[in-house]
Image (cartoon, coloured by chain):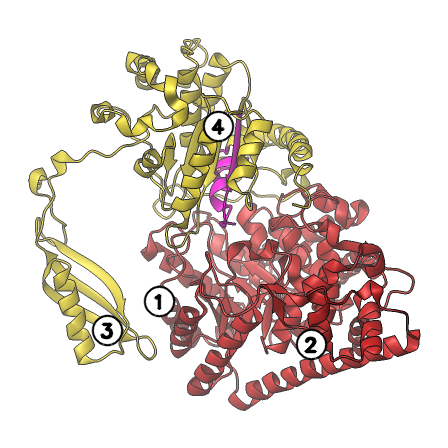
Chain colours: A red, B yellow
Amino acid sequence: MAYRKLNLDRDKIDQCRDIAARIVSPVQKYIDRHSTTSIERSVLRIFGIEDAHLEMPHANLIVDRLDRDRLRKGIAHWFGRALVHTKLDAKVLAKKLATDELRLEDIPEVPEEHARRAARELAEAGLRRLDEARRKRDGAASNLGIGPQPWKYLIVATGNIYDDCAQAVSAVATGADIIAVIRTTAQSLLDYVPDGITTEGFGGTLATQANFRVMRTALDEAGRKAGRHIRLVNYSSGLCMSEIAAMAAFERLDVLLNDSMYGILFRDINMKRTFVDQYFSRLICARSGIIINTGEDNYLTTTDAYRNAHHVLTSQFINEQFALNANLPPEQMGLGHAFEMDPTLEDGFLYELAQAQMIREIFPRAPIKFMPPTKFMTGDIMFGNVLDTMFNVCGIITEQSIQLLGIPTEAMHNPHLQDRYWALKNANYIFQNLRHIGDEISFNPNGKIARRAHTVLENAHKYLRKIEVMGLMKSISKGMFAEIERAEDGGKGLEGVFQKDRAYFNPVLDLLKERGS
Amino acid sequence: MLKVNLKKLKAYGDRLDDGIVQLSFTLPVSASPEAKEAARRYAEGLGLEKVSIPAMEPMGEGFAYFVAYGYAKHSIDFTKIRVPKVEIPQMDYSELKDYMARNIDRQIVVIGAATGADAHTVGIDAIMNMKGFGGDYGLERYPLMKAINLRSQLTNQQLIDKAAELSADAILISQVVTQRESHIKNLKEFRDLIKKDKRLPKELVTIIGGPRIDHALALKLGFDAGFGPGTKPSQVASFIVHEYMKRRGLREKQATVETQAQPASQRTEINAPALHSEKPRHEHHHAGKHHGDRPRGEERHTHKPRQAVHHAATVTPNKPPEALDQNTDTLPAAVPQKKRRRRGRRGGRRHRKRREKINAATNTPESGS
């Protein structure tokens, strides 16, 4: 791959990585000392506790019924003890606990070693299921093959999982490689994952394990017909970040939206909660071979894409370090960015090229995800199509990995069936017609594009240094990202964060960490 | 010049009154000659004659997409059309700034949010954030406005509580992505809640905005104004300032000689007695229902809101700023370079300060909700 066209300062890039590592390090120390209710629920889910009682998941009921002081030892400690004492099957035990037939705190002590062994066995069984799901998916991908990059990423969002399937299958027939089922918008603030197949939602469809399964089955079928593996995407963000990761891993999803800071900035979720949760969720993604997609594109919807291009790069460096800490290899880091410059900007396309090429070169192994224009889509669908065309041209020239296709009716409604069709036809034509254009192009070393890339890198370097001095949490509270300010103890979900006891026990965490080091 | 018959207005394709219409749609059947014929008849049923289907595209199994052309039979009497609009004089940022400095003795408090299930803040950000939209500064930049953008994920009740807490003079609600009329449901709920709430002053201005909002809908739902896509912040600001003065019976003070911001035509417009003679209407404003009863005649002969400028159609190229130094971090884009630097630095600092204050005010009460 001809990834060195801008003659970027490699030392500067290395320095940026070093600074980002130093920025993340104190946060990682915080993460290592803490857990959250969501992580403890994920542990139960990996133990195989997937049922619900009166629409509330057993995992929630069990964790919520245990007082916070006891929870500091880890749910696995208590659950393991109950397993040994009652000798019940995990699911049966979970049901009794969830319906208050049994209480964890009432169960008499058993030898610590026995309790731990019981929990560890469940954890190992859970991870075997994760690994099995991964093998199955990787097998399908290598048997069927996958489309050439940029992978065409399309969104469905009807609220009804069956309509979603019909639309997804239609998109696959026209060339889609990746299907994302948008979540109903308020789901990120739910502190539990709903249960079962759903047919109602606003602006999207509820993420449930059953819905994952329905869509996975539909895409497997569509993929067999189309002769390529179709990747499925959902959202590991919000208050149930790590639980969704576990559920998605079991149901063979391929990609998860997962950002170390998105929830803080754009969903007003408490930063401590998000940092602790993202770590565990990424450990699961790493183990399951799930590609994460980070949300830097969102910054450009609140700030100016030309002036604040270095914010995107800065955040990518930080996301990369968090990901490395969670054992994610670069091949699973779908760092995000977007084509959002004002279309009236003179030479705007050159700056978009500079940005996209620069990111490609700085993260050569990462499956970079390129997001389409949204801010300057007006409802003039003809002009919208032109903007999307330029976006696609930029994507293929700069060899992006994942191209979220722009839809001409952006900002009007969730895409109609034919909207998606236009988008695909546009991308099919451009990607096919310009397939190897990237190999043919080199940039004038003193031209606008190269100079712009250097400037953005330089600015990101300065910005990282500023953040390092201030500290990451303080920087967020000062509006350094997306020009949005979030207080350290503000936002939602802080009550779910707790400090681990010295005897904290989490066999899932131990196993997940082991693998990478 | 073409002689257009306004009493019988028809679509224009190639010749006057040919009534040519283009449309595209999907039928949930696979592409086939029968599907194409079905599409033709479907378009005929929509009132088109001599329908042609130049494109039938298969979209996977069970769906086909069509482009259709046809000649529409019917016509519209244009002379009979009345559309409710926000009928107030429009001023731009600097005109409004001067106007407010002359006429208003305190900051107008404006709060805004995308409410309900909608988490899309592009609309409210474009109107409220300092930078604004399309070269027009946002409400945060107005010195005599205290603009507080609460962004998204608020319930209607939370927004109303916030309005009471901050003594808001105006509330902006944005509804961007909606499905199956969920925005209507949400706005109705807001209206019902606000009617019941005793803490809010009767002068409170309520405004809605979004791609599927227009002024007529706003009035129908009991809001004071509705703004559709392409709206500039100054249009919203003009309306807020105008209503603020009107509802308090404030009269405009004349501009001094050195502030020549206002063109003469607009000055007379603002002084137009019609605006003040409407006062009694607002005695019972709070019920939010009077708009429906507003006599239609009022809507004539006033200024139309400024048209939204399409990005691609703008003639002057937007030059990028040259440097990206740290100091320019908070500068707005899309205004001429010189002006931006001078104002931006001042504005930037003030902006940050105020935002810190606002942040302190807005972040505390709802943590952990």
The residue that mark 2 highlights is: A48
Is any part of residue A517 visible from this angle? no
> Gap between marks 2 and 3, in whole Å?
49 Å
In the rendered image, the residue lying farthest to the front is A101
Query: In this figure, which residue is indicated by the disc labeled 1?
Result: A417
Question: In front: mark 1 or mark 2?
Answer: 2
Element type at marker 2? loop
Question: To which quarter of the image does residue A333 belong?
Answer: bottom right
| Residue B194 image offset from top left, x and y in percent | 47, 32
Q: Magenta stretch: give its range.
A: B109-138
Amino acid under disc 4: Ala
Between residue B258 and residue A402, name the one nearer to us. A402
- The amino acid pointed to by label 3 is Met
Q: Residues within 10 Å of mark 1 (few under 14, many from 20)?
A: many
- Please tell me whether mark 2 or mark 3 is closer to you in this view: 2
Q: Amino acid at mark 1?
A: Leu
Same subunit: marks 1 and 4: no
